[in-house]
Amino acid sequence: MVAARSNLRSGLNRGHPTTVIPRAVKPSHKKGVKTEKKTFVKSVIREVAGFSPYEKRVMELLRNSKDKKAKKLTKKRLGTLLRSKRKVEELSNVIQEQRRQTGH
């Protein structure tokens, strides 16, 4: 806790005396039950809309084992390497699911 200001020019509690306004408590953005709803909504959207053209291209690169090229392409589109890695991982999981469904 900071000591009250004393209206002096110098010293430990220098400065014009003011009243401290208490900070409002902001809500936390922790993950909870809402994440299940988000994943359901995302899956429905993916089912209806399908994949974007660049995602199809990345999937084709992953099928031809061009992982580095796929990461470079997604990084160019998404902005950061972390987002790129997540997207490549997501699309490689989609490819694995497709292979399981076809019976390979």
Image: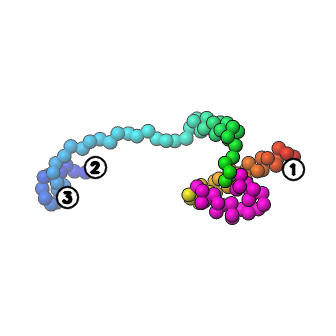
- Tag 1 secondary structure: loop
The residue that disc 3 covers is 12
Q: Which mark is residue 1?
A: 2
Give, as a three-letter code, the residue at label 3.
Answer: Leu
Position in image of residue 103 (x %, y %): 87, 46
Earlier sequence position, callout 1 versus callout 2:
2
- What residue is rendered at 60% in x and 56% in y? 77
Position in image of residue 89 (x %, y %): 68, 54
Span colored in magenta: 56-78
Check if mark 1's residue and mark 2's residue have beta carbons within 8 Å: no
Would you place residue 5 above or below residue 76 in this image? Answer: above
Give, as a three-letter code, the residue at label 2.
Answer: Met
Would you place residue 96 above or below residue 68 in this image? Answer: above
- What residue is rendered at 68% in x and 51% in y? 53
Residue 19 located left or right of residue 8 = right
Question: Residue 12's quadrant in the figure?
Answer: bottom left
Q: Residue furthest left?
A: 8
Earlier sequence position, callout 2 versus callout 3:
2
Residue 100 located left or right of residue 57 = right
- What residue is rendered at 73% in x and 54% in y? 59
Question: Residue 57's quadrant in the figure?
Answer: bottom right
- Marks 1 and 2, how far apart at CA: 66 Å
The residue that disc 1 covers is 104
> Quick check: is 54 in the magenta stretch?
no
User: 32 or 84, which lies in front?
Assistant: 84
